[in-house]
Every structure is written in C-alpha cells, then in structure tokens.
C-alpha cells in the first residue's frame, strides 16, 4: 500500500509551471524526503497532497482516498511558515488543534501533557504562546501536528532554525513516530539529515522530478568518481591537479570529484605531501544535489547552513 500516490500532476500559476507532469509513490510506513532548491516545487507538491491547492491536471490519492479531504483527519501537517495563536495558553491551544482533528478534550490533555513532559515543556502548559522562546514554540507546534496520532505526517522544513539540542529532540520524535507505523514526509535543505533519516528520497528541480529512490539507488547512478581526501596542504594543493573537477570542503576532509583514475591522483599527491585519508566513495547527497541544480542550489544550501549556525 502507498500512503500517497501522485499520477501525472501539473500545477501552473499563470505562465509559470510550478510542477510538471509529476508522478511518485510514497510507501506506507516510510520516511520519505523531499529535497530541492527554493522555488523548485516542493511546497507546491506538499500543498497539493494536503488539498490546500488543487492540481491543474493529474490525480492524487492520500491514504487510499482519491478525494484528499476524506483523509484530512488522518494527516498532520507542520508548515514551513510557523504560526500559533500567540494569546492562547499552550494547553488550550493543543486542545483546540486536537478538536479540529476529532480528538476529545480528555485525549488532548492526556496526549498533550505527555508530549510536553517529553519535550521538557511541562511548566509551560499554562503559559501563553507569546511568552515562549522560538525553540519552545516550534516544539509546541510539532506537538499540535502529531497530537491526533495521524497516519501520515507532513513536515515542511521541520529542522529549520532549531538549535542542535532542539533539533535532536524533534529528530528523535520523528524516528519514534515512524517506528510506531506513521508515514513521514519531510522537506529539507539539510542533505546530511536526509541521508541519515530517509528510506527514500525525491528531488524536484524546476518543477520536474529528477531523483526518486533509495539513497543507495541514487548514489549508484552517480558512480564512484568521488574521493574523500585529507592532505597536508589542504584544498589548495588538491585543486592544482588537472583531474580534479570539484572540491567540497567538509571540515575534517575534502570530497573530491575526479575525472579518470583516482589512483593517479593519489600517486601525484603522495609525491608532494602527506596523505592521511584517501577513500574512494559514492558521492554524498549534497554533491549529487549540487551536480543537478548547480550554483543556485549550492547557495541555497550554504545560506541555510549559515542561518542554522547563527541560531546555534
């Protein structure tokens, strides 16, 4: 069974094609990652799945229902644009959101209190949302998303702006939800997080699907032209070799795309400096992302990293 099936869907805004002839299937019980540069069509696709907007052509089936509205109470959604009623107290807010999904007041209180305790927010239950820090408010919004125990959870950039501690709390919660059987779809610019968490990955670029499969499948397509290197002299020395097409600095080592035999690069570097790491590897998801989407995509990733670093 598939939690979501999209068949030949197109969505336009005037002359702009936001999504073009898109087909994909999200397996039930999967953690399914949506990746792509800003403006590529990720959020439009998520909103069509949620029936917030309708496709111009094609069909979408959610949890077995062709009319997506029939599955609304079984789906939880965390939008990228966070928004809570700031004047409401946290416990009342959760009860309200729960009621929209058919959760009784008693269930909302029991489940809400359990989640608040888990996130170390028990003392905030009777505080107004406006009195919460940004990280606390984001955790409250996550709780509101999952309070109804939905079968499908859709998270649009769930880790954006979180400090490392709160990011790990939300990540662990997502993993636990999935272990209980919840299907999770989330969009992210964090390629490392996508690699670690997702069973399958879908990449959309300029409205078109360019990747869809497991990480192994995707990496296999891009061969073994990637080398992980650490040398005395660093990036500048590596870039001087004519076989090197691209160098990505990952801190403790450089990820290098090589044209030709990687062993020739090793021999050349070993003749000039000390090589402390040399590993022929599949390309990282970050590298594949940049190969497909080019400099604009790399800028989008770097801007997101810089914003997250500023928060932490």
Image (cartoon, rainbow, N blue to C red):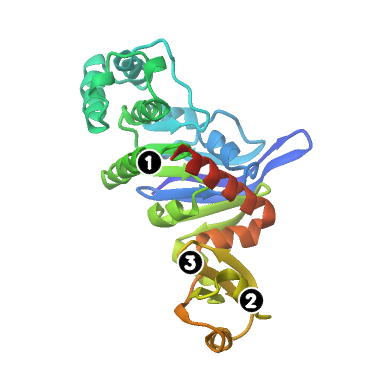
Residue 238, quarter of the rendered image: bottom right
Q: Nearer the viewer, residue 233 or 280?
A: 233
Q: Nearer the viewer, residue 270 or 127?
A: 270
Q: Residues within 10 Å of mark 3 (few under 14, many from 20)?
A: few
Disc 3 is placed on an element classified as helix
What label does residue 310 carry, if any? none
What label does residue 217 carry, if any? 3
Q: Is residue 48 above or below residue 84?
A: below
On the image, numbered disc 2 is attached to which residue? Answer: 244
Q: Residues within 10 Å of mark 1 (few under 14, many from 20)?
A: some
Residue appearing at x 25%, y 15% in the figure: 105
Disc 1 to disc 3, C-alpha distance: 28 Å
Quarter placement of the C terminus: top left
Does the image show residue 156? no
Q: Nearer the viewer, residue 82 or 309?
A: 309
Left or right placement of residue 55 versus residue 143 in this view = right
On the image, numbered disc 1 is attached to which residue? Answer: 167
- Which one is closest to the eye, mark 3 or mark 2? 2
Residue appearing at x 44%, y 19% in the figure: 84
Left or right placement of residue 91 versus residue 225 in this view = left
Are circles 1 and 2 on residues that touch, CB within 8 Å? no
Disc 1 to disc 2, C-alpha distance: 35 Å
Q: Residue 207, how many percent across, how many down?
A: 66, 47
Q: Residues within 10 Å of mark 2 (few under 14, many from 20)?
A: some
Which is more N-terminal, label 2 or label 1? 1
Disc 1 is placed on an element classified as helix
Q: Residue 52, how many percent across, how many down?
A: 55, 28
């Amino acid at each position: 069974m598939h939690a979501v099936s999209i068949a030949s869907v197109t969505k336009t805004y005037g002359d702009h094609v936001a999504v073009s002839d898109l087909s994909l299937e999200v397996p039930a019980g999967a953690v399914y990652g949506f990746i792509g540069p800003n403006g590529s069509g990720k959020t439009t696709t998520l909103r069509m799945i949620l029936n917030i907007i309708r496709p111009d052509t094609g069909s979408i089936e959610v949890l077995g229902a062709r009319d997506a509205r029939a599955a609304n109470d079984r789906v939880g959604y965390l939008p990228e644009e966070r928004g809570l009623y700031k004047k409401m107290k946290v416990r009342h807010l959760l009860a309200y959101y729960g009621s929209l999904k058919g959760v009784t007041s008693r269930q909302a209180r029991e489940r809400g209190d359990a989640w608040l305790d888990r996130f170390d927010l028990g003392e905030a239950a009777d505080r107004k949302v406006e009195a919460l820090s940004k990280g606390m408010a984001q955790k409250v919004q996550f709780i509101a998303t999952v309070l109804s125990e939905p079968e499908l959870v859709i998270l649009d950039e769930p880790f954006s702006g979180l400090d490392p501690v709160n990011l790990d709390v939300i990540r662990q919660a997502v993993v636990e939800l999935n272990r209980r059987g919840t299907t999770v779809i989330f969009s992210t610019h964090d390629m490392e997080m996508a690699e670690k968490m997702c069973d399958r990955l879908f990449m959309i670029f300029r409205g078109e699907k360019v990747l869809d499969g497991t990480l192994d499948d995707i990496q296999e397509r891009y061969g073994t032209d990637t080398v992980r290197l650490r040398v005395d002299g660093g990036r500048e020395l590596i870039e001087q070799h004519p076989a090197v097409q691209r160098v990505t600095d990952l801190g403790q080592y450089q990820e290098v795309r090589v044209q030709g035999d990687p062993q020739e690069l090793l021999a050349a570097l070993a003749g000039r400096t000390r090589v402390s790491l040399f590993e022929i590897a599949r390309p990282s998801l970050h590298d594949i992302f940049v190969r497909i989407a080019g400099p604009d995509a790399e800028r989008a990733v770097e801007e997101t990293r810089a914003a997250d670093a500023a928060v932490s």
